[in-house]
Image (cartoon, helix red, strand yellow):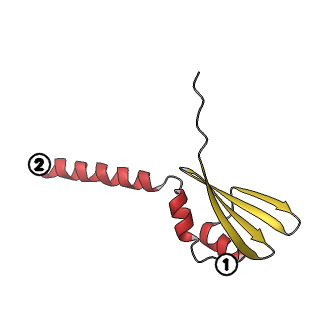
Amino acid sequence: MTPRTLVRLASAVLLLLVLAACGPPTKEDLLSKARDVKTRAELEKALGKPTDLSKLGPLETWTYKASNGTVVFVVVGDTVTLQATGTAPTKETK
């Protein structure tokens, strides 16, 4: 292989790695980042704004979309009390 071919190959591999890292996080990535989160502010700092936010009185559900499903955090007052994950919806075939 010539040096020019090696540079092209290395560039292509690097580009693929960069593009793969730009996709949405997995459920495991989100849970890992939020492992020691106790408050609403810590959750938002760790994961950013949720994809969906539902409120019912002092109870809030913060839902984050992941590449392989969803992660839901229940926030009561200022305290994160529960974490749950769900699977991505499957496409129906006829």
Q: Position of residue 73 (x, y in %)?
A: 69, 64
Q: Is residue 14 left or right of residue 33?
A: left
Q: Nearer the viewer, mark 1 or mark 2?
A: 1
Q: Foreground residue, 94 or 47?
A: 94
> Mark 2: which amino acid?
Thr
Q: Foreground residue, 80 or 5?
A: 80
**Do residues under tags 1 and 2 come within 8 Å of each other at their CB atoms?**
no
Q: Foreground residue, 40 or 76?
A: 76
Residue at x 85% of width, y 69% of height: 58
Q: Position of residue 5 (x, y in %)?
A: 17, 47
> Mark 1: which amino acid?
Lys
Q: Secondary structure at mark 2?
A: loop
Of label 1 and label 2, which has the lower sequence position?
A: 2
Q: Position of residue 82 (x, y in %)?
A: 68, 68
**Mark 2, other Cα within 10 Å: few <14 / some 14–19 / many ≥20:** few
Q: Quadrant of residue 76?
A: bottom right
Q: Secondary structure at mark 1?
A: loop
Q: Please state, as top left, top right, bottom left or bottom right, where the C terminus lies in the image.
A: top right
Task: Count the labels in the image.
Answer: 2
- Rounded to the nearest angstrom, the CA distance separating label 1 from label 2 is 55 Å
Q: Quadrant of residue 41?
A: bottom right
The residue under label 1 is 38
Residue at x 72% of width, y 62% of height: 62
Residue at x 40% of width, y 55% of height: 18
Q: Position of residue 43 (x, y in %)?
A: 66, 72
The residue under label 2 is 2
* The disc label shown at residue 94, or none: none
